Image: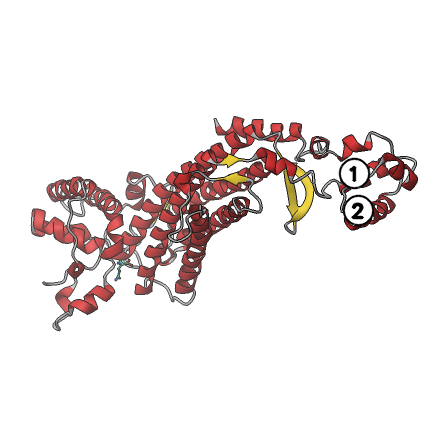
């Protein structure tokens, strides 16, 4: 079959080589955007008199027909036609005859493909942003149920100080809020029209780039034609923001996996988000959380892959740029589905509040309380720290905890210690009393939740 660009060629093409060069196996996902771009372009060509109104009308009708078929997934693409642009142009030709050839006036596949991807990503960013928002709502709802659920807070994965489980959930809420902000802020750099940059240098035809940019709903346009067809920074920014987002999800998943373990038993994921083992009948594995943790790797890979593709490319278009798509599609899909799974997993998970709380009662996570207690009574904090450190050591030797030390022993260590020490050492007290701004005290956590709820409505 003759190539649309075949004029200069007299040799035959070979199918296996065509297959290597083709992008249609993945860029078919840009069909809708490609047709939208063509519709805007043809309207402009008609309005500026570059082609006649009659020609523009014929081509528009043909394109609209293709759009209907695309929406119903009725288009059949072929490798011979290489990519989405040439496939659709060929179909248009079959539909309306040689006048279809006028569509590509004052345009190149280089500005066409860039336009398609800007349109695609603009839509996807908005969908992903909504999914982040949904997940943030789930986090806040769960947090609201667990303000008074006490759990160990960790540093170095060692019990550090008791915290509210809601504080832990709201930490992720904060991260996800910034992820959503990053996505929203990046929209500005996706919302730019490359259409009309043509192959690299602009065109001799009297096109109206503002008209096509407006028609496609772009907020601005590239003011340098070489830049418009060469850069993929808008995709890189998306992959980079997605990598940060997936890193957050992966971290959370790592905790869920730990918390589901026999040793922790802090939470239980519902059956829908767990799987069994083909050999060990007792197993209930947190597969979905593990997969999200794993999938963060492919998103980081997509970012690194495209950075590597781009780093040595001379301006302007090079075929290497065709490698920008699979990673972008893959990340869109991975991020979208991961967010949905996260929301489902967290909203349905069972929290073993008693187990969490008990974990804070048989440990030394109240050591800071004792040191603070002594400091409030006038003992310099460094000295208080030393006293408590020694006490912890002697407790570990005796196999007891700070709350098990009799008052008489305490008073022998320091007369400032009174019977209210036991109340002070209770993990719940330790949490409640941390009412510094942003701290884990119940009132502070409630304030975070109500601020979040106001933003989310
Ligand atoms: N399929 C190509 C891509 O994705 C479209 C642009 C082709 N341009 C060219 N000059 N060969 O990059």
**Is the shortest distance between ligand 1 and the CB of mark 2 under 8 Å?**
no
Cβ–Cβ under 8 Å for marks 1 and 2: yes
In space, the residues marked 1 and 2 are separated at their CA atoms by: 9 Å
Could you say whether the residue bearing mark 2 is in a helix, strand or loop? Answer: helix
* Viewer can see residue 434: yes
How would you rate the neighbour count of disc 2 (Cα within 10 Å): few for under 14, some for 14-19, many for 20 or more?
some
**Is the shortest distance between ligand 1 and the CB of mark 1 under 8 Å?**
no
Toward the bottom, the furthest residue is 11
The quadrant holding residue 344 is top left
Could you say whether the residue bearing mark 1 is in a helix, strand or loop? Answer: helix
Q: What x and y, as percent, mark residue 421? A: 81, 33
- Residue in the foreground of this view, choosing between 361 and 452: 361
Q: What residue do we see at 71% from left, 42% from top?
A: 365
* Residue linked to disc 2: 395
> In the picture, which quadrant includes the N terminus?
bottom left
Q: Is residue 84 above or below residue 49?
A: below
* Viewer can see residue 133: no
* Residue linked to disc 1: 404
- Residue in the foreground of this view, choosing between 245 and 389: 389
- Residue in the foreground of this view, choosing between 159 and 247: 159
Q: Left or right of 435: which side holds 297?
A: left
Q: What x and y, as percent, mark residue 385? A: 82, 46
Q: What residue do we see at 69% from left, 45% from top?
A: 160
Q: What x and y, as percent, mark residue 178? A: 53, 41
Q: What x and y, as percent, mark residue 410? A: 87, 38
What colouring style does the render use?
secondary structure
How would you rate the neighbour count of disc 1 (Cα within 10 Å): few for under 14, some for 14-19, many for 20 or more?
few
Q: Mark 2 or mark 1, which is nearer the start of the sequence? A: 2
Ligand 1 appears in which quadrant? bottom left
């Amino acid at each position: 079959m003759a190539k649309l660009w075949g004029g200069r060629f007299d040799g035959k093409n070979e199918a296996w080589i065509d297959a290597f060069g083709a992008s249609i196996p993945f860029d078919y996902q840009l069909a809708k955007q490609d047709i939208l771009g063509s519709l805007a372009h043809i309207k402009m060509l008609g309005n500026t008199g570059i082609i006649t109104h009659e020609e523009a009308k014929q081509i528009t009708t043909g394109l609209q027909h293709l759009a209907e078929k695309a929406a119903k997934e009725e288009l059949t693409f072929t490798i011979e036609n290489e990519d989405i642009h040439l496939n659709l142009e060929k179909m248009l030709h079959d539909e309306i005859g040689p006048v279809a050839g006028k569509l590509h006036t004052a345009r190149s596949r280089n500005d066409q493909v860039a336009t398609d991807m800007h349109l695609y990503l603009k839509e996807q960013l908005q969908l992903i942003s909504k999914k982040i928002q949904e997940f943030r709502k789930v986090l806040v709802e769960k947090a609201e149920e667990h303000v008074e659920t006490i759990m160990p807070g960790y540093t170095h994965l060692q019990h550090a100080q008791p915290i509210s489980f809601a504080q832990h959930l709201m930490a992720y809420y904060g991260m996800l809020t910034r992820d959503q902000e990053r996505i929203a802020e990046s929209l500005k750099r996706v919302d730019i029209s490359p259409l009309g940059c043509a192959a690299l240098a602009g065109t001799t035809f009297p096109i109206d780039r503002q008209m096509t940019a407006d028609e496609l709903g772009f907020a601005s346009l590239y003011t340098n034609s070489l830049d418009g067809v060469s850069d993929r920074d808008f995709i890189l920014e998306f992959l980079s923001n997605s990598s940060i987002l997936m890193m957050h999800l992966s971290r959370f998943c790592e905790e869920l996996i730990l918390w589901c373990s026999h040793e922790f038993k802090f939470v239980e994921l519902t059956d829908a988000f767990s799987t069994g083992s083909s050999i060990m009948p007792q197993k209930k594995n947190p597969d979905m959380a593990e997969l999200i943790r794993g999938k963060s790797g492919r998103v980081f890979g997509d970012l690194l892959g495209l950075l590597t593709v781009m780093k040595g490319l001379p301006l302007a278009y090079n075929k290497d740029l065709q490698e920008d798509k699979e990673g972008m599609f893959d990340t869109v899909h991975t991020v979208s589905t991961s967010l949905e799974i996260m929301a489902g997993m967290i909203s349905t998970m069972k929290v073993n509040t008693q187990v969490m709380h008990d974990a804070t009662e048989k440990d030394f996570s109240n050591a800071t309380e004792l040191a603070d207690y002594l400091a409030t009574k006038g003992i310099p904090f460094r000295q208080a720290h030393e006293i408590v450190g020694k006490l912890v050591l002697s407790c570990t030797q005796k196999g007891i905890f700070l709350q098990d030390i009799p008052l008489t022993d305490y008073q022998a260590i320091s007369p400032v210690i009174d019977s209210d020490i036991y109340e002070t050492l209770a993990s719940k007290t330790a949490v409640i009393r941390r009412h510094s701004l942003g701290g884990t005290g119940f009132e502070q956590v409630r304030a975070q939740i109500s601020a979040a709820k106001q933003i989310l409505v």
